[in-house]
Image (cartoon, rainbow, N blue to C red):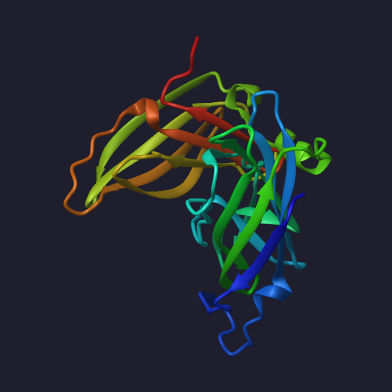
Amino acid sequence: MMKTIASALLGASLWASSAAHAQVPRPSDIVAAEIRPGWRTEQGTIMAALHLRLARDWITYWRHPGESGIAPRLDLSGSGNLAGARLHWPAPRLFTKAGYLSIGYADELVLPLELTPTQTDRPIDLRAALNIGVCDDVCIPVDMEFAATLDGRGAPDRTISQSLERRPSTARAAGLSDLQCDFQPARKGMQLSAHWTIPQQPGEEYILLEIPGSSWRVQNLPSLRAGGQLTGQAILRARKGETAAIDRSTIRMTLITPDGTFEHQGCAVAR
């Protein structure tokens, strides 16, 4: 039998506000959360999900919040019989809050969690600590804790399956035909520009640049469109006291548009 407990902890603190005199809402009035227990896959993993429901006009953030916001953090280290976990983020949307471009979700977020048990004949004792930001006119950090016993005996969950179907597509699917990266000196660092040869997408286009697992701090800048070329830009700064090199193959790029999200790894397009 599956047991799930979710609780919002530590209340709320004001992170940013365009109306500082307004009363800060309670987290429980903004976001409700649960663990969907899911099912066991053919690979022996358990496909569960974290399901967040948001109050009207509030948003929460993708794995990267964009130009502003609070990046989510999920800590599963307190879990039992858990050998590994993979998060399957559904495609996010672009939002403009207080003049800044943010990346996230409105209404709800169903985040599939693919969990690998250490011993396949035993359930996973999931213990999760979640830290997220939720924003409307104010932005509030919310801390939650979850406990769930997951045995994978349930049938496939359509809500989780639909979220898996909404994962980003490849950039090739959007028509990416060529890609070049260049680096230029910048104040206390360097500027990375990723030039995509790709048809113009409807609405706003934004390329997010990331270097996962590196020592670089990445500050993304607005993307630029010139004819058939779209350029994503970022300022790279090495963390204090650390020497960092750049492996072009590790640069992760995500094009986010109103009609879809498209990912590409590395500074080349396979022929």
Number of marks present in the image shown: 0
Tell me, yes or no, if residue 200 can be seen here: no
Q: Which residue, as the protein is rendered here, is positioned at the far top?
A: 271
- Taking depth in this image into account, of 232 and 217 the one nearest to the observer is 217
Residue 254 location in percent, x, y?
A: 54, 37
Quadrant of the image occupied by residue 9:
bottom right
- Taking depth in this image into account, of 143 and 264 the one nearest to the observer is 143
Residue 118 location in percent, x, y?
A: 53, 35
Decide: is 110 above or below 195.
below
Q: Which residue, as the protein is rendered here, is positioned at the far bottom?
A: 21
Quadrant of the image occupied by residue 203:
top right
Quadrant of the image occupied by residue 228:
top right
Decide: is 253 above or below 110.
above
Residue 266 location in percent, x, y?
A: 42, 26
Tell me, yes or no, if residue 151 can be seen here: yes
Decide: is 249 above or below 23.
above
Residue 168 location in percent, x, y?
A: 64, 34
- Taking depth in this image into account, of 204 and 22 the one nearest to the observer is 22
Instruction: Please name the residue shown 57% across and 78% down the image.
Output: 12
Instruction: Please name the residue shown 71% across and 36% down the image.
Output: 164
